[in-house]
Image: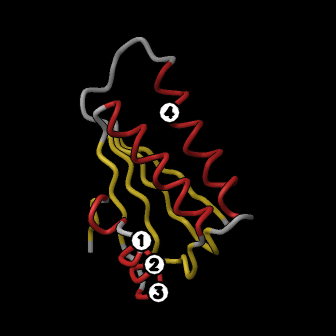
Amino acid sequence: MEVNVQMNGGAYLLDLSGKLDGVGEPVLQKYIDSIFEGEEGKESKISAASICINFQEVDFVSSAGLRVLLRTAKIAEKRGWDLTLKNLNDSVRMVLDMTGFMRIMKIEE
């Protein structure tokens, strides 16, 4: 799993590539943690922060990948941030649909 993070104001874009599985999950989790921890230390609160995760180059998501997405969604909701998943391929979309994630996550085409 490779993660490229870009920031524009209070918006974070994470471009993923590879498999979001037991090996890739800690890689993504490290980046997510650094985003949330970095924002806690700032004196001025960002009024409308968001995270967008781009799945265009992701071909597989396991239960470990679902766990990091669920954890990220819970923290984002608690902080009032938006979390969006975009560019899901058919296999990733099917996993998210079968597990109910399509109903609880904001999906962008």
**Residue visible at 52% across and 62% down in the picture:** 66
Q: Position of residue 101 (x, y in %)?
A: 37, 65
Q: Position of residue 90 (x, y in %)?
A: 41, 88
Q: Nearer the viewer, mark 1 or mark 4?
A: 1
Classify 10 Å Cα crowding around label 3: few (below 14), some (14-19), many (20 and above). few
Q: Amino acid at mark 2?
A: Val
Classify 10 Å Cα crowding around label 1: few (below 14), some (14-19), many (20 and above). few
**Rounded to the nearest whole Å, what is the CA distance between mark 3 and mark 4?**
29 Å
Classify 10 Å Cα crowding around label 4: few (below 14), some (14-19), many (20 and above). some
Kindly check if marks 2 and 1 are in contact, taking CB atoms under 8 A apart as contact: yes
**Residue visible at 50% across and 33% down in the picture:** 36
Instruction: Label 1, secondary structure: give it.
Output: loop
Q: Which mark is residue 99?
A: 1
Q: Amino acid at mark 3?
A: Ser
Q: Which mark is residue 91?
A: 3
Q: Nearer the viewer, mark 3 or mark 1?
A: 1
Q: Quadrant of the N terminus?
A: bottom right
Q: Amino acid at mark 4?
A: Phe
Q: Position of residue 35 (x, y in %)?
A: 52, 37
